[in-house]
Image (cartoon, helix red, strand yellow):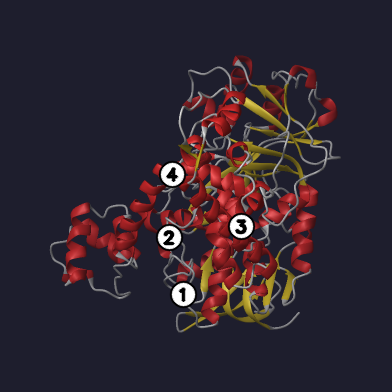
Amino acid sequence: MKNSYDIVVVGGGHAGIEAASASARMGHSVALVTMDADAIGRMSCNPAIGGTAKGHLVREIDALGGLMGRIADASAIQYKMLNRSKGPAVWSPRSQNDRDAYAAAAKAQLEQTPGLDILAGSVSLLHVEDDRVVGVTTSDGVEIRCRALIVCAGTFLNAAMYTGLEKSIGGRFGEHPATGITETLLRYGFESGRLKTGTPPRVSLDSLNLDETTLAPGDEHPEPFSFQSPRPAFEQVPCYITHTNAETHGVMRGGFEQSPMFTGRIQGAGPRYCPSIEDKIVRFSERDSHHLFLEPEGRRSNVVYVNGFSSSLPADIQLRALRTVPGLRDVEMIRPGYAVEYDFFPPHQLHLTLETRAIRGLYLAGQVNGTSGYEEAAAQGLVAGINAALALEGKEPFILARSDAYIGVLIDDLVNKGTLEPYRMFTSRAEYRLLLRQDNADRRLMPAGHRFGLIPDDVYAAVRDREEIISAVRTLVESRTASPDVLNPYLASVQSSPVTQNEFLGKIIRREEVRAAGVLGLDGIAGDAQVSAALADPRAVEQVEIETKYMGYIERQQRDVEKFGQAESMLIPEHFDYSRIHSLSSEGREKLMRVRPRSVGQASRISGVSSSDVSILMVYMKK
């Protein structure tokens, strides 16, 4: 242990892991301060990574050189690609993970990182001089100097846990809360609030009757998260699906008078899109059934996570309700579900780099910014770690636009729109989602990851080689034709209508039932050197097929992005005096002064800034 580091990271959760790893690998001395080194990467809630839109975030984290995808692959027990029945813009990878193996892999990654020290403890005080962070004091009274501080405290800030009428302090079962940070920031004028999250009960696998449930196996041909991981070759562990019923809901209603949410003991807003089972019973009272997913916590674990049954009702009510569910009639509950209430800082107080506006060198990342989920936290941690390192080097900040990545959408939403409830990423939040697919994250973001030294040279070279192949084959299919004699036997094999004259290959590939690999493998086409290279690389063929089939839509979104870029390039001076523009609305002026947008484009996305305010601002900036 040293008494001085370039960067101190507070918290060993998913945000802290990415922040500490990135800034250390970029050449800086880093201290990761965490209450329990063995809890690094602990999956507080469900033992899974990814899901709808969240899987996009993980792929982007991986493309930038982050760790989450590789840790997920090292601990996966099942893979699924969600939304396959829909278009590729919303395909989303998800993995079920071994909870203990995930934490072990995360800790091992950090321990093997040069320049990174893991310190056991809790930060209780921040030291600030001339509005710049200069160090911290731990709860043990140890002072550590630093040039940048990244707070990734998750759900631990002044946290309290609730099960029925029982209340205990802590941010996770068996772990103490973090105190002192909120109080320090309040003294510097920060706004804070309270949010709530929850977790379902854990039950014994041996006590389940799985014959009464529905099997939910993994994909037949699973795909890894990381672009650097080999294709999975292990036997996948299945999950199971069951459902609540009217009897379940009746039992739970009987405990509502002891619910900390309904009795007002919890004041913080809960996650709208991942509600507790109590919330679902009340909000969707017309429904007498809700799906539950029984997810093993590990390959050899006897613990099962009851996904969809998040609850803070008394333990006896939870157990009685579980025993009304098919497959759970004789269930043994290992640990009841509980709710956690914790402090957060409304994210309008941040720059798009995740540095705070009030204190230079101080970055906030993860659930302290009002987000929900491992993936949203990890994405923020990575951006904060990169930007802290770049700032210390005197380099330009790293800011992803909404047209660049889901990570850009996430941070832009937080800073410009704020949040009064736990924020969750969805594909519907991304205007350019056909361009921001999970399958092309490496093509979009690896150049930046390589520039920061987070992507190895050989990995980046392989991506550049593939890009050349994709470009060449895309040009070929739009410019080359094939005769009916060549095309029709294949078209008949996929039950597609025959052609009567030479047709461009791209037009054929755009047919719904046609696969690019089938067309490229035809006689007279497969012999082309670039086509042969593409056929040897399934990912290259996939990219050719998607870009060919959706060419018109992609070109339209690219035109939209160009218009978007024009507004983004119209920069606003950092200390611009909005009071000089008298024609702005009062609310617009107030919101602009609070957020301090860096461009007219960013100003247009601030809640409360009208289209007329934007037009006035644009005219003024042009002058």
Q: Look at the numbered disc 4 and give the secondary structure of its residue.
A: helix
Tell whether 579 sits left or right of 378: left
Residue linked to disc 3: 466
Q: Position of residue 483 (x, y in %)?
A: 52, 35
Which mark is in front, 4 or 1? Answer: 4
Tell whether 11 sits left or right of 106: left
Q: Is residue 156 above or below residue 275?
A: below
**Is tag 2's residue or tag 1's residue first in the polypeptide sequence?**
1
Q: Is residue 25 above or below residue 559?
A: below
Mark 3–mark 1 distance (CA, rounded to whole Å): 43 Å
Local packing at callout 3 (Cα closer than 10 Å; few below 14, some 14-19, many 20+) is many
Mark 4–mark 1 distance (CA, rounded to whole Å): 46 Å
Residue linked to disc 1: 359
Local packing at callout 1 (Cα closer than 10 Å; few below 14, some 14-19, many 20+) is some
Residue linked to disc 2: 401
Which mark is in front, 2 or 1? Answer: 2
Indicate the amino acid at tag 2.
Answer: Ala
Residue at the spot x=29%, y=56% of the render? 604
Residue linked to disc 4: 551
Which mark is in front, 2 or 3? Answer: 3
Indicate the amino acid at tag 3.
Answer: Arg
Could you say which is closer to the camera, residue 310 or residue 384? 384
Q: Position of residue 232 (x, y in %)?
A: 77, 45
Which quadrant holds the N terminus? bottom right
Mark 2–mark 1 distance (CA, rounded to whole Å): 24 Å
Say if mark 3 contacts mark 4, CB within 8 Å. Answer: no
**Is tag 2's residue or tag 4's residue first in the polypeptide sequence?**
2
Could you say which is closer to the camera, residue 164 or residue 29? 29
Q: Look at the numbered disc 3 and give the secondary structure of its residue.
A: helix
